[in-house]
Amino acid sequence: MVDLDGRLFAIADGMGGHRDGHVASRTVIASLQQRGATTSPLEARIGDATYALEEANAALFSQTLANPAAGISGSTAVVLLVGEDYACCLWVGDSRLYLMRNEQLYLISEDHATPDGTLTRAIGSADKVEVERRIVELADGDLFVLCSDGLLKGMDEHELIGILCEEKENSADRLLAKAIAGGSVDDITLVLVWALADE
């Protein structure tokens, strides 16, 4: 999801091995879109986006309660909200937000998953969801990378840095091609956001 007017960017990745992952991820994005484009202060937009994720969780979990035999339908989510001087990351699950600054890569989110990759938290997997958040002060030249876990199944972070340090044009295409060439067979979704702080 890319909402330039609302300066809101998001990725949702349906839980593998569970029913209707594509429906779950669409539910998350649709909920965010309903509370998108706004000129409200950053803190208010963070509240709106958090509430949207909680609404999506309630909708997905109610479907599970209505038909428990079908199993859980859930999704990960990572959201970036860009303000004037600060940005906020909201996340649930193992989709990630990276910050590339001065050719150094920083992982802003923290995976809600066990070492073997099993999700410990997802939207729709329980009656309530805890949405984590982290605030980052912006600097000129910052590049944010939102990605599903499939991207890093076909490359490591050093290779990610190498591609991001090249020319901006077609960076997303080159990352996708590298991940596929590296053997990733999982769904790959990514969004690149260049954020400029005000003078």
Image: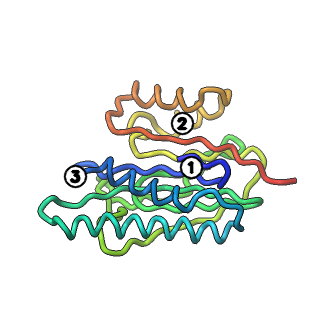
Q: Is residue 93 above or below residue 186?
A: below
Helix or strand or loop: what does disc 3 sit on? loop
Helix or strand or loop: what does disc 2 sit on? helix
* Residue receiving disc 2: 160
Q: Residue furthest front?
A: 34
Residue at the (78%, 48%) spot, across then down:
140
Inter-mark Cα distance, 3 to 1: 29 Å
Residue 26 vs residue 147: left or right? Answer: left
Inter-mark Cα distance, 1 to 2: 10 Å
Q: Name the spot of residue 21 as percent of width and height, x first.
A: 30, 50
Tell me whether the residue at label 3 lies in contact with that at label 2, contact meaning CB atoms closer than 8 angstroms: no
* Residue receiving disc 3: 19
Residue at the (48%, 49%) spot, across then down:
11
Amino acid residing under circle 3: Arg
Q: Residue furthest right?
A: 199
Q: Earlier in the sequence, mark 3 or mark 2?
A: 3
Amino acid residing under circle 2: Leu
- 154 and 147: which one is in front? 147
Amino acid residing under circle 1: Tyr
Tell me whether the residue at label 1 lies in contact with that at label 2, contact meaning CB atoms closer than 8 angstroms: yes
* Residue receiving disc 1: 98
